[in-house]
Amino acid sequence: MPMLIALAISIGVLAVVATWLFLGPLAALNFQIWQAFVAWASFYHCGGKTAGARTTVICMSFGALIGALSVMLAGQLGALGALAAPVAVGIGAAAIVLAAHVGLLATIPACVYGFACVAGLILLKGVAPLDALVPTIGSIVLGAIFGWVSETVAGKLTKPSA
């Protein structure tokens, strides 16, 4: 079977499972399906396989931490008025780019995905920054796992039968 068809089947079926899991049992933990899908996409963006999963989890989690800290900083910069959030985000973005000197944090886009995911949860659900970290990182880890499983299953579907 062609790889694209195998991926369509694998990702489609696993998307059903992931959505059920996140909207059902994991909903009470505030895990977010959209964050998992971002991590799933990041897995492929980072090259897939074990290395892509590792890069996704490390970089997106780091980005989520920087994002949560940026939201907290924005609260402390209240004297800047309407510039508080933009300045805090700019400092966070600069920190992500500077951290790229560390090999494990060198995939800047994946770090930015994590920043966006935690900021989205904070802004959309009104979750406190530090309280948003655990469900965000949990969603990232599960999304990377779903990426790895989808790639593995698609690989098995493309192998000719013996």
Image (cartoon, grey):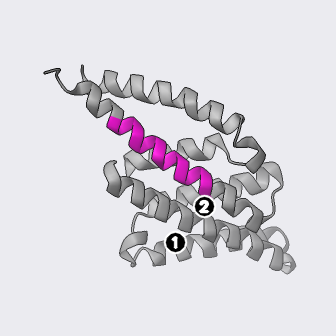
In the image, is residue 140 above or below residue 133?
Answer: above
The residue drawn where x is 66% and y is 39% is 22
The residue drawn where x is 69% and y is 73% is 69
Q: Is residue 83 magenta?
A: no
* Structural crowding at the residue carrying mark 1, measured as other residues with C-alpha within 10 Å and reported as few (<14), some (14–19) or many (≥20): many
Checking the image for residue 20, the label placed there is: none
> Left or right: 83 with respect to 91?
right
The residue drawn where x is 69% and y is 43% is 26
Residue 47, visible in the rendered structure: no
Checking the image for residue 96, the label placed there is: 1
Q: What segment is highlighted magenta in the picture?
A: 137-152
The residue drawn where x is 68% and y is 61% is 134
Q: How many marks?
A: 2
Residue 33 position, x and y percent, is 63, 40
The residue beneath circle 2 is 115
Question: Which one is nearer the viewer's eye here, 44 or 30?
Answer: 30
Q: Quadrant of residue 76?
A: bottom right
Q: CA distance from mark 2 to mark 1?
A: 9 Å
Q: Is residue 145 magenta?
A: yes
Q: Quadrant of residue 70?
A: bottom right
Question: Mark 1 is on which residue type?
Answer: Ile
Residue 65, visible in the rendered structure: yes
Q: Quadrant of the N terminus?
A: top left
Residue 88 position, x and y percent, is 70, 73
Question: Which residue reaches farthest front?
Answer: 162
Magenta stretch mostly in which secondary structure?
helix
> Left or right: 82 with respect to 3?
right
Question: Which one is nearer the viewer's eye here, 137 or 72?
Answer: 137
In the image, is residue 27 above or below residue 100?
Answer: above
Answer whether labels 2 and 1 touch (C-beta < 8 Å): yes
